Image: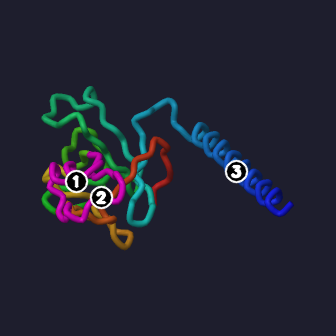
């Protein structure tokens, strides 16, 4: 009798989990911007806050010498701009190289070596993304502030990627 009660509790909990999963999938569908798949969200591995991102198409880069892995980061009603250690928020301009950042997926220690990430000997907890400036610095978040620093194997430079756009802080 006692085992039967425990089994029923487990079955009920599993059903609850399935219902929550269905709700999340419905929310995911409702919040996706189906008209413009170029808008994405970055989630900080440091504090889980989000930054909206725009994936720049090659066709939008008029005769620019910029790679096809370019993104603009929306922040404080503008776009993040970084040039020669100067980080600001400016009016968004697709062709402004100082507002163009590359995102790279780090799946293993070999990827860490490829992108010159310090302390790769610590290993990798889980796959993550890095946001890199044109001078090969990584986006770093600490105490609600953003900066670009030498790439390091720390949570402050871990970013997760989501297809769902959300609010920016």
Q: Is residue 52 above or below residue 147?
A: above
| Callout 2 crowding tier (Cα within 10 Å): few <14, some 14–19, many ≥20 | some
Residue 135: x and y, percent? Answer: 13, 53
What span is in magenta? 103-131
Q: Check disc 3 and report the residue beneath it.
A: 14
Residue 25 horizontal/vertical position (percent): 61, 41
Which residue appears farthest toward the top when viewing the image? 59
Q: CA distance from mark 2 to mark 3?
A: 31 Å
Mark 3 crowdedness (10 Å alpha carbons): few <14, some 14-19, many ≥20: few
Residue 160, placed above or below residue 163 = below
Residue 168 visible in the displayed image: yes
Q: Residue furthest bottom?
A: 143
Distance from Cα at disc 1 to Cα at disc 2: 7 Å
Q: To which residue does mark 2 refer?
A: 124
Circles 1 and 2: CB distance less than 8 Å?
yes
Give residue 8's quadrant in the image: bottom right
Taking the spot 45% from the left edge, 61% from the top edge, the residue there is 48
Density class for disc 1 (Cα within 10 Å; few <14, some 14-19, many ≥20) is some
The residue where tag 1 is placed is 109
Can you say whether 63 is above or below 18 in the image? Answer: above
Examine the rendering and report whether any part of residue 86 can be seen: no
């Amino acid at each position: 009798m006692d085992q039967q009660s425990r089994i029923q509790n487990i079955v009920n909990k599993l059903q609850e989990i399935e219902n929550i999963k269905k709700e999340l999938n419905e929310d995911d569908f409702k919040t996706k911007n189906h008209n413009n798949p170029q808008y994405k969200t970055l989630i900080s591995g440091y504090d889980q806050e989000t930054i909206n991102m725009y994936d720049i198409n090659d066709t939008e880069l008029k005769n620019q010498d910029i790679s096809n892995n370019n993104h603009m980061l929306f922040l404080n009603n503008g776009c993040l701009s970084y040039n020669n250690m100067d980080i600001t928020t400016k009016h968004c301009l697709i062709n402004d190289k100082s507002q163009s950042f590359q995102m790279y997926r780090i799946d293993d220690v070999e990827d860490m070596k490829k992108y010159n990430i310090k302390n790769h000997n610590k290993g990798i907890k889980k796959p993550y993304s890095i946001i890199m400036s044109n001078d090969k610095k990584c986006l770093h978040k600490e105490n609600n502030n953003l900066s670009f620093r030498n790439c390091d194997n720390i949570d402050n430079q871990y970013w997760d990627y989501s297809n769902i756009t959300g609010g920016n802080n």
